[in-house]
Amino acid sequence: MDDIKKIAVICGGTSTEREISIQSGNGVMNALIELGHDASIIDFKDIDDLNTLKNFDLVFIALHGFEGEGGELQDGLDNLGIKYTGSGTIGCKNTWNKTICKNILFKKNIRTPKGITLNSLEDDSVDPFKKFEDQFGYRKKLFMKPSEDGSSIDIFKISDNFEYIKSRNSCINKSREFLFEEEIEGKEYTVTIINDECFPAIEIQTKNDFYDYNAKYLSDETILAEAKLSEKNLNLINKISLEAYKALNCSGWARVDILQDNDGIFYVLEINTVPGMTSHSCVPKSGSFIGLSYSEVVKRIISYVK
């Protein structure tokens, strides 16, 4: 770590998560400066040539959305021999597309909510409830979500076709792949992993229907509480999180989102390879439960680099 002096914090970009990414980037940059590093923030949309990043000892990727989590940036940095934080190309590609992620989890016998995929929402004759029932033999309320996006953008909870059509018409972009995933009633948790170490699990408590964009970034009523699980279940949720993290070839740091149904069974929902680092974010909150400041969490993240 002594050879890492000059750090570029990449954020912003052009995705729907741009503003959140800028908040994350500013938080990380300020922490790095506090830690004594020469840190600069760079908006990804202003980068014409990745070669300019060779002037830095490390790139801290705080870039949400496809540009930072889809794997292409990591591939480019690898080809140039530039060190960066977080998962490599394969880990990012495995987790960015929710359908691909889910298929890998199924193959590795890691429990995840069942779902079906539509290539787009353009065909209004398709009934996702019937398609789900035809495949799995039962009907449930569904969560409709883009296969590739973050921050709970264009995610809707739907109970019937009327709600589906209403939600479909509200989508920012209908002409992309959507996943329709069964609702798991119960509690929602998230587990931060840094350098293969699970930080304290968080129970997400929100008055919204689910942990949507408003609950994540805008509401002051969302509670990120340290999970009050039995020792057995704490060990289990950590075990499941690490298994999913490794099965998807993640490294460095990530956040694993998990649901627990009313029978106490855990399901891996998804993995974020570039988690939010805003004042409302789960990663710094989890670190605070073991006495780490925001800056100390950032220090842990940069202690493992490619």
Image (spheres, rainbow, N blue to C red):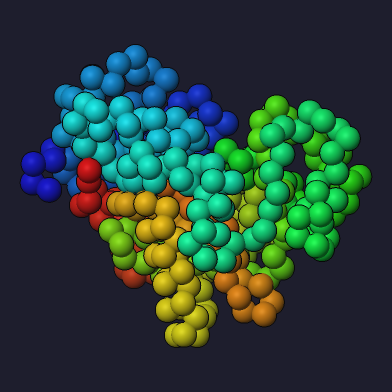
Residue drawn at point x = 24 percent, y = 28 percent? 79
Examine the rendered structure and indicate whether residue 230 appears above or below residue 265.
below
Count of picture labels = 0
Indicate left or right for 135 with 100 as reference. right
Examine the rendered structure and indicate whether residue 55 appears above or below residue 179.
above
Residue drawn at point x = 76 percent, y = 33 percent? 121
Any part of residue 293 in sight = no
Query: Quarter of the image holding residue 262?
Result: bottom right
> Looking at this rendering, what residue extends furthest in the right direction?
162
The location of residue 294, given as percent across then percent down, is 34, 54
Indicate left or right for 261 with 168 as reference. left
Front position in the image: 107 or 66 = 107
The location of residue 137, given as percent across then percent down, is 80, 62
Residue drawn at point x = 88 percent, y = 35 percent? 125
> Looking at this rendering, what residue extends furthest in the top direction?
48
Indicate left or right for 305 with 27 as reference. left
Front position in the image: 177 or 286 = 177
The location of residue 191, given as percent across then percent down, is 45, 63
